[in-house]
Amino acid sequence: MPLIRPQNLDAERAVISVLLTNRDRYYEMERMLRPDMFFGLDNALVYKTIEDLYSEGRAPDVLVVKEVLNRGGEYDSIGGDSYFNQLPEGSELEVNFGEYVGIVSDSYTLRRVIDAGIKITNIGYTDSAVTALDVMFKETNSVLDASSFGTDSFPVGEVMSEELAAFLYRLDHPGSDGIKTQFGNFDLLTGGGLRKTDEVIIAARPGVGKTTLALRWLLNLAKQGIPVAFFSYEMSKPQLMQRMMSMESGVGLTRIRGGLVSGADVGKVVEASTAIMSLPIYINSNAGASVSEVVADTKRLVRSSGIQAIAVDYLQLMPHRTEYATQDLGQIARRLKILAMDSDITVLALSQLNRMVEMRSEKIPLLSDLRQSGNLEEHADIVLMIYREETYVQNEANRGRADLLVRKNRNGPIATLPMRFSANTVDFAGCAAEEMIGG
């Protein structure tokens, strides 16, 4: 009786069914499976189609996958409608999704072991011992590499060698590791500005300026030729454009929104708007976008446009998967941190502070004011909080004054960094490098 190659077509179909009904699952296992790991050629083709759609930032479902296969002339090759009619119900299989992925991966590894064994056996009959041993080692390593797909372990010597070279480069180019925000005191405190792979939380009470600070920093990056993206859950695209018009022209936001601009200021707004049009800034104002869609769109922009930083405004407005919003926020923050590391970008994650700030006589926010918003600070490399005394007490002494409170800095000191705020243009400006107060 002939032996059957290891396979489990039911597990393969289960994986595909779940991916067609729950996009979040794809990002849990995208580095664990490849199309060639599926035994069924029809399953491999459908999985590759799903993978391609995710990489393009699109959300695959049965209708979309059918359309893509049809346009590629491959729909009939998988069996047409009968293939999809035979798929199990994905929502019923989610609880064991990890098991199905493991079965598909293990079956693939066993097939590789069999193929390697056959090759080694055949070489043993036909070639020298030295050649046979060489083939055996190569095939064994090939199988091990295949079975460890998705892992990222490197010998310390290799990693240290790269970092030593980077250190020696920084000696001749101080601050070259960072992306400068043009806020001198922040760039100095962080050794060069924003860092790739970092997640930076920018937190404040409503109306204090977290959107404004994120927009200002992204504008400053873009004006250095650095591609960036802004994901807004609170403001429409026209509102964001009006903000940027005002920030870059110096003409009051209220006047721009109300069409009350005249004389030379019209030219300032047109000139600023024209300059903004040429900047590498991408705007996404889909208020219903899940964290998975943000991840997919960001990865697409990294590949197509080389973006180096994104801002998400703001975390509490992102759709939650369960009724446990606090727990979901922690999971969202973790997903964004993984995105920063995997895509080698900076993620600015904006967050509301809880109401405890308002209940104290001292309104300066503390790290504890963030903790009831999920475990956001645990995943962040830097936690920044904005404080403007004039939002509580207005006088000449505090007019336009703002403080950027560095409440957590995983790789450096904490401090209070003075800023300037313009209520007219709703904009922040940084202060000189030497202007900071130690934490």
Image (cartoon, rainbow, N blue to C red):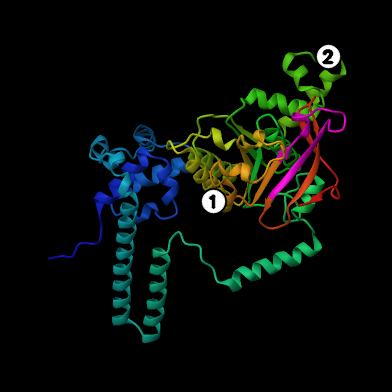
Question: For the magenta stretch, what is the residue range?
Answer: 386-407
Point out residue 98 in the picture as x, y percentages from the top left corner. Answer: 35, 52
Q: Which residue is mark 1?
A: 338
Type of the residue with mark 1? Ile
Return the residue found at the far bottom: 129
Q: Nearer the viewer, residue 178 or 126?
A: 178
Residue 289 as seen in the image, left or right of residue 137:
right
Badge 2 is on which residue?
262
Marks 1 and 2, how far apart in space?
Answer: 48 Å
Picture coordinates of residue 5, whole percent (x, y): 24, 62
Residue placed at 35% from the left, 56% from the top?
A: 37
Local SS, label 1: helix
As displayed, is residue 232 above or below residue 296? above
Q: Looking at the picture, how far across and down is residue 415, in whole percent?
A: 76, 50
Q: Nearer the viewer, mark 1 or mark 2?
A: 1
Residue at 81 percent of width and 48 percent of height: 185
